[in-house]
């Protein structure tokens, strides 16, 4: 895939963890062996549970945490090899939208100052034109121009998220990394923001890395979906494939756990229940990290780390990290779980 | 005070559950206000509902719709000030909670009705073991010995699916994972063998796979009456027998779960359902988004609170708040337009 | 910084205050009604009264310090009347005369011209040094942080007055040395406060957001960290103005501060010791010190009540605001620390 905007290969982000509340210390492999790419104008969703490394992935691409190894190529430039000054310049190409629009905005700055800050930092525009540009950006995200001189606390959560999006758009990035952008919003407001994201994509040919635990939102907005578990990629395929024909047992369980807002469907479908919780990232299982909760686990899963390999047919790339990846995984897992 | 007032007030239940069974938990015309710097916020306005034995009622609404305030006020758990319950009646198995003394209330809470919260970490006392906290209630309500209470705690933990209950009982809340803690909180709530369980978004802070486990657990409590507060329509669809939808402090629609999801009558409920992205949708058109924002509770309009955002609004909606009227069997909506439609249909 | 993502953190928690804010949550409800408890809700009326008293007193002293030469006929140093020495209050000399026949009223009023600037300069120096060092320690962390904090621990381990006394004695008695010695013992408190502020602000999401835009470290610190740390500093500095006046008087009382015949309140009280019969010699400068210390405490406390909701709730436990102020006024730093 040479036409990819962003190409992440074998990315690893490790932290040295001090002895925490749950005891133990050592290296936390927050992200390990991650491969994926994002095309121009494409939206890749990243889903997974707490601690799966999806937020860390976003931060690593934005250069806010250091990649331990691997490469992050943005238009052919490896971001991990840049010096700190160049990293800051590179941040113009990618921008972030955060989960909590209340705490991600500096409450002492006016909306105008907040949205103009990237312009100021990257000096892409003469200062005299900032106000005009900010007004234009606010219009783009559906905020009135009068918001310019007001403070974030005067706005609602959904409006604050719009301000955050306007800020991200200010320097015309190619890629926007959305880290749980709708988690803090109410259902009806979430719909507004999701619609806005798609509208902006149509208008601006933006690419998104859409990180969320909300599978329905990710499914709604993404072209392809990456499923992560304990820092490792589990499955990567188009949204429909991930939903209709997942080949990783974890994806099957995850999809089955998402409640569907329809009583007839929700009550009659078979739920695949995983046992227990996500293991501690300080002490991940050997071999396949999912094996401790996997209904299909065999001896080989403990000893051999499954390769993240392409099982796609008729030209579609479908990456899975499972020894037993096969079409019809959903039925297999359901049958196994029912035993 | 030598004569203890009778616990049963003998009051007639104001509303019968549709099946004609005497409700186990009933809230009638509840009104709650909050004193704020901006003025008096009317957080709960004339809210009434009832729950039949073994029934699960879900209360759905967005932040600020008053769903949590309703339940906390009903159990007299809201701090006063800033809150004030200005009217209403709450019956638990025929006992009017508002007529009880503080002490009598404490006897009822945890024994007849108990509550599970969203944030299991802060709902537990961090410096007491799980077992001690489960025991506390049952020793008080059921007069068990320390030993018996401990045994019961272990039994309860086992019942809610906590592995190694013998060890877990002596652990502190922070030593348990989020899902495990939520199970322990359910164990604590059920230890007093309550007739009614109030659950305030108990799975919101959990991962989906863990949420699925908890939902499965709750579904297994067949005889328990449950009031489940949630903003997640998916969870509600899988759990509730009946659904009440709240908006700006009022119930604007209630009815059987299938009616609400398939035959919603109130424009807000319809829009809310349309705004949820669904995994099933093969096509992805734009989601239904409700323009604007809910009204300020300090300055509620005299008419329908949804007026400003409503797609079918009429002038009459401005004059007064529409009452909940039957639009189908056991199904009520507070909307003039929906009421007319139901009448002509 | 492993993933800490949790679904829906922001939806209404069970805390009563959060409950009180149905419109304030992320819902996107109009923010016009601020549901946070206002000062009035907490019965902060007493705080306002104290604030007004404090401001009035301070303003009164400032006016006196500026205008005193125009409305007292006596010079505090040169106008000696040995015939009329040690005269009691009344008549021409409102506060009586001292053992050299100087007018005590004039000397007490002129004292403000010394005490106020000493307090202002000392606190300014202390704040500047303390905040800078503290901010550096908090922002850089690591070894710099360790070294700075251990040094400040050493300074803080001495009772302030004892250490200031030692420094002032070593430097020799003079007004400048009073400033130096007091600043030398008070800076670590600002260092600790500022470091704590920076450490907590550094983890705010808006700081990460600023980095994600591409702000340089210097800009992040200057625009997104520093302004948030200043509020508690301002409060503490105000209270400390009173404290420094007390300390300065203490040094002069002991004899290592202002040199006679300078009209300094502490020195005047010291002189009065040997002439207990002439009560007016000690009472009036003593009252002057008391009024000044109380005034700054009143202002500082009112400010704290406004800025810092945590202190506000503590008021309920630790006695009333008045008792806290009085305890600090009369027991000084020791009393404050002990409390």
Image (cartoon, rainbow, N blue to C red):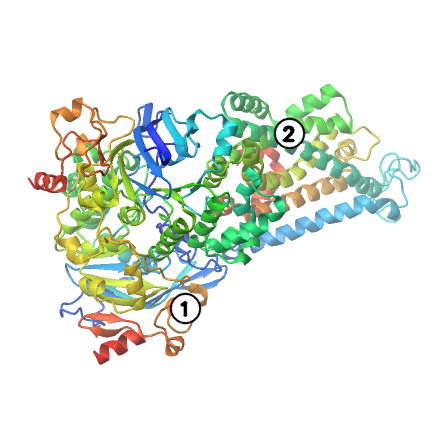
Left or right of A197 in this view: C253? right
State the image coordinates of residue A307 (x, y, percent, origin top left). 22, 27
In the shown orientation, is residue C226 left or right of residue B329? Answer: right
Q: Which of the pair B134/B332 is nearer the observer?
A: B332
The residue where tag 1 is placed is: B308
Q: Is residue C26 above or below residue A225?
A: below
Q: Residue farthest to the bottom?
A: B344
Can I make out residue B7 in this image?
A: no
Q: In the image, is C44 to the left or to the right of C179?
A: left
- Give residue B54's position: percent from left, percent from top: 14, 58
Residue in the picture at 89% in, 40% down: C75
| Closer to the eye: label 2 or 1 | 1
Residue A184 vs residue C280, the one in the foreground:
A184
Residue C107 is labelled as: none
Q: Are marks 2 and 1 on the same chain?
A: no
Chain of the residue under the numbered disc 1 shown in the image? B
Residue at 59 percent of width and 28 percent of height: C133
Q: Position of residue C215 (x, y in %)?
A: 53, 36
Quadrant occupied by the N terminus of chain C: top left
Q: Secondary structure at mark 1?
A: helix
Report how many numbered discs are placed on residues in the image.
Answer: 2
């Amino acid at each position: 895939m040479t036409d990819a905007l962003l190409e992440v290969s074998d990315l690893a982000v490790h932290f040295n963890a001090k002895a925490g509340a749950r005891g133990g210390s050592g290296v936390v492999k927050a992200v390990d062996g991650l491969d994926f790419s994002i095309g121009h104008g494409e939206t890749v969703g990243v889903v997974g549970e707490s601690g799966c490394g999806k937020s860390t992935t976003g931060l690593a691409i934005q250069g806010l945490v250091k990649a331990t190894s691997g490469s992050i190529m943005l238009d052919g430039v490896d971001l991990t090899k840049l010096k700190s000054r160049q990293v800051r310049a590179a941040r113009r190409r990618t921008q972030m939208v955060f989960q909590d629009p209340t705490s991600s905005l500096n409450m002492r700055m006016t909306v105008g100052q907040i949205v103009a800050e990237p312009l100021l930092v990257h000096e892409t525009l003469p200062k005299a034109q900032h106000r005009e540009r900010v007004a234009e950006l606010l219009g783009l995200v559906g905020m009135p121009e009068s918001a310019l001189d007001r403070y974030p606390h005067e706005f609602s959560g959904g409006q604050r998220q719009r301000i955050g999006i306007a800020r991200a758009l200010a320097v015309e990035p190619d890629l926007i990394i959305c880290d749980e952008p709708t988690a803090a919003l109410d259902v009806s407001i979430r719909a507004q923001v999701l619609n806005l994201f798609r509208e902006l994509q149509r208008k601006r040919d933006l690419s998104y890395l859409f990180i969320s635990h909300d599978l329905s939102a990710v499914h709604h907005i993404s072209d392809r979906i990456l499923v992560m578990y304990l820092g490792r990629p589990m499955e990567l395929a188009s949204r429909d494939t991930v939903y209709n024909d997942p080949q990783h047992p974890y994806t099957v369980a995850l999809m089955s756990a998402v409640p569907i807002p329809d009583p007839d469907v929700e009550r009659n479908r078979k739920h695949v229940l995983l046992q227990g919780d996500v293991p501690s990232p300080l002490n991940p299982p050997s071999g396949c990290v999912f094996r401790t909760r996997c209904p299909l686990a065999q001896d080989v899963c403990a000893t051999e780390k499954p390769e993240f390999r392409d099982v796609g047919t008729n030209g579609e790339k479908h990456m899975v990290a499972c020894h037993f990846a096969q079409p019809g995984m959903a039925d297999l897992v359901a049958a196994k779980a029912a035993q | 005070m030598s004569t203890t007032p009778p616990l049963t007030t003998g009051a007639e239940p104001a509303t019968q559950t549709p099946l004609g069974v005497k409700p186990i938990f009933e809230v009638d015309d509840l009104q709650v206000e909050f004193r704020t710097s901006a003025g008096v916020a009317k957080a709960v306005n004339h809210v009434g509902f009832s729950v039949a034995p073994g029934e699960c009622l879900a209360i759905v609404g967005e932040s600020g719709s008053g769903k949590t305030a309703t339940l906390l006020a009903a159990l007299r758990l809201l701090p006063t000030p800033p809150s004030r319950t200005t009217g209403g009646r709450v019956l638990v198995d025929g006992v009017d909670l508002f007529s009880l003394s503080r002490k009598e209330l404490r006897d009822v809470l945890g024994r007849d009705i108990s509550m599970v919260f969203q944030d299991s970490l802060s709902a537990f006392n961090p410096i007491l073991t799980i077992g001690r906290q489960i025991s506390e209630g049952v020793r008080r309500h059921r007069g068990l010995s320390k030993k018996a209470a401990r045994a019961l705690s272990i039994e309860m933990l086992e019942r809610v699916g906590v592995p190694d209950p013998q060890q877990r009982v002596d652990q502190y809340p922070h030593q348990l994972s989020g899902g495990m803690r939520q199970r322990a909180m359910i164990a604590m709530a059920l230890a007093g063998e309550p007739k009614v369980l109030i659950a305030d978004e108990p799975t919101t802070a959990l991962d989906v796979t863990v949420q699925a486990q908890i939902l499965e657990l709750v579904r297994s409590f067949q005889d328990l009456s449950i009031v489940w507060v949630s903003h997640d329509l998916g969870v509600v669809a899988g759990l509730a027998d009946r659904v009440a939808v709240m908006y700006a402090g009022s119930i604007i629609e209630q009815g059987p779960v299938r009616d609400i999801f398939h035959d919603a009558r109130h424009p807000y409920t319809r829009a809310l359902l349309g705004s949820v992205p669904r995994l099933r949708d093969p096509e992805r058109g734009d989601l239904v988004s409700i323009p604007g924002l809910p009204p300020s509770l300090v300055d509620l309009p005299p008419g329908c609170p949804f007026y400003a955002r409503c797609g079918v609004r009429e002038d009459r909606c401005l004059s007064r708040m529409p009452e909940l009227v039957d639009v189908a069997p056991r199904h009520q909506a507070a909307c003039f337009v929906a009421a007319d439609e139901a009448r002509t249909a | 910084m492993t993933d800490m993502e949790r679904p829906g953190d922001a939806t209404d928690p069970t805390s009563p205050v959060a409950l009180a804010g149905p419109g304030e949550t992320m819902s996107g409800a109009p923010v016009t009604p601020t549901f946070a408890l206002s000062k009035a809700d907490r019965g902060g009326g007493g705080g306002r009264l104290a604030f007004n008293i404090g401001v009035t007193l301070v303003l009164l002293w400032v006016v006196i310090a500026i205008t005193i030469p125009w409305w007292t006929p006596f010079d505090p140093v040169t106008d000696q009347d040995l015939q009329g020495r040690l005269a009691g209050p009344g008549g021409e000399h409102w506060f009586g005369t001292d053992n050299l026949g100087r007018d005590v009223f004039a000397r007490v009023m002129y004292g403000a011209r010394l005490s106020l600037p000493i307090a202002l300069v000392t606190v300014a120096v202390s704040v500047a040094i303390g905040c800078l060092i503290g901010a550096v320690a908090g922002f850089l962390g690591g070894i710099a942080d360790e070294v700075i904090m251990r040094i400040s621990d050493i300074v803080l381990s001495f009772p302030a007055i004892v250490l200031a006394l030692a420094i002032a004695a070593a430097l020799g008695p003079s007004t400048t040395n009073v400033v130096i010695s007091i600043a030398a013992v008070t800076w670590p408190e600002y260092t600790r406060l500022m470091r704590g502020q920076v450490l907590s602000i550094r983890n705010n999401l808006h700081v990460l957001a600023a980095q994600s835009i591409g702000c340089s470290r210097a800009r992040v610190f200057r625009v997104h960290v520093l302004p948030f740390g200043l509020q508690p500093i301002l409060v503490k500095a105000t209270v400390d103005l009173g404290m420094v006046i007390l300390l300065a008087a203490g040094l002069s009382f002991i004899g290592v501060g202002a040199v006679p015949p300078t009209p300094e309140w502490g020195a005047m009280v010291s002189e009065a010791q040997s002439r207990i019969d002439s009560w007016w010699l000690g009472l009036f400068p003593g009252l002057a010190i008391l009024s000044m210390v109380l005034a700054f405490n009143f202002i500082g406390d009112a400010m704290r009540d406004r800025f810092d909701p945590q202190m506000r709730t503590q008021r309920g436990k630790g006695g009333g605001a008045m008792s806290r102020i009085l305890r600090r006024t009369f027991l000084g730093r020791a009393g404050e620390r002990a409390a």
